[in-house]
Amino acid sequence: MLEFVALVVFAIVGLGLLIAGVIVLPLLLVGGVLKLIIFAIALPFRLIGALFGVVAGVTGTVFGGIAALGSVLLAVALAIGALLFLPLLPIFALFGLIWLFSRSAGKAKA
């Protein structure tokens, strides 16, 4: 008797699994097909986005390198200019004092 009950339970469970398989398997297939269709529709936009990303990265690298090189060259030019004008600093100070005294003397006369 117990074997018959187990056989009936297994038959009911098996029948339920068959019915569930008939319902679930097509749903899984439809879901997979929909995912494939959405992927195929979105693929060109993903490729264009990747292309824009690569172009932006290369452009940023190139212009970043140019900006870094320009700033280094500007710093070197300013350093060379400062070193060239450093010996002339006393002469500029002397001329500045002469100009300051001549300007103040001119205002005193008026």
Image (spheres, rainbow, N blue to C red):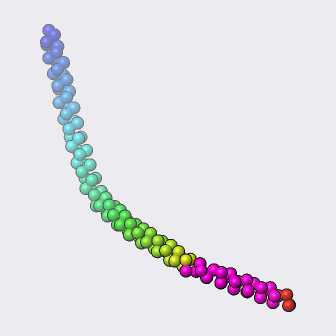
Comparing 50 with 39, the one in front is: 50
Left or right of residue 108: residue 94:
left
- Name which residue lies at 28% across and 58% down: 43
**How many marks overall?**
0
Query: Picture coordinates of residue 78 (x, y %)?
Result: 53, 76
Image coordinates for residue 25, horizontal then vertical, percent? 20, 38
Residue at the spot 63% in from the left edge and 80% down from the top edge: 89
Q: Where is residue 73 drawn, in percent x and y?
A: 46, 74
Q: Which residues are drawn in magenta?
A: 84-106
**Would residue 51 be visible to someone looking at this image?**
yes
Seen in the picture, residue 26 relative to 82 is either above or below; the reply is above
Q: Is residue 110 above or below residue 51?
A: below
Residue placed farthest to the top in the image? 1
Is residue 45 visible in the rendered image? The answer is: no
**Above or below, comparing residue 22 to residue 96 in the picture:** above
Q: Examine the residues drawn in magenta and state their main secondary structure.
A: helix
Left/right placement of residue 68 relative to residue 4 reads: right
User: Image check: 98 left or right of 84?
Assistant: right
Give the camera-side residue of 27 and 96.
96
